[in-house]
Amino acid sequence: MGGNLYKNWGPEQRKHWNEYNRNYSRTHFKTVNFKLRFNEDKDILDYIAKHKEISLSDLVRLSIREYIKNEK
């Protein structure tokens, strides 16, 4: 037996699972939002669209770490 059988769970199991996920996310992640302008940031938007194999989170992490490294 493999994989997540979430689709076969009853309402009570789903409720507990969703609660666990919310709590885990709240204690392990920080959500950061930002906006890009269609015209001024077109190069960035095009890059993101062209490189879908790279997660946006990874791309932002790598970019900011590179910026921090070069700032010193």
Image (tube, helix red, strand yellow):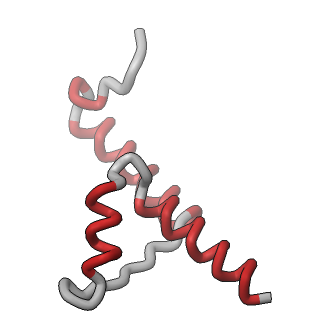
Q: Report the number of discs.
A: 0
In the displayed structure image, the side of residue 17 where residue 24 appears, left or right: right
Task: State whether residue 47 is above or below residue 68.
Answer: above
The quadrant the C terminus occupies is bottom right
The quadrant the N terminus occupies is top left
Spot occupied by residue 32 in the image (x, y as percentages of width and height): 44, 78
Task: State whether residue 39 is above or below residue 69.
Answer: below
For the point 57% across and 65% down, the residue is: 27
* 17 or 38, nearer to the observer: 38
Spot occupied by residue 7 in the image (x, y as percentages of width and height): 22, 29
* 9 or 72, nearer to the observer: 72
Task: State whether residue 68 is above or below residue 10.
Answer: below
Spot occupied by residue 53 in the image (x, y as percentages of width and height): 38, 46
For the point 23% across and 24% down, the residue is: 8
- Farthest front residue in view: 43
Spot occupied by residue 9 in the image (x, y as percentages of width and height): 26, 28
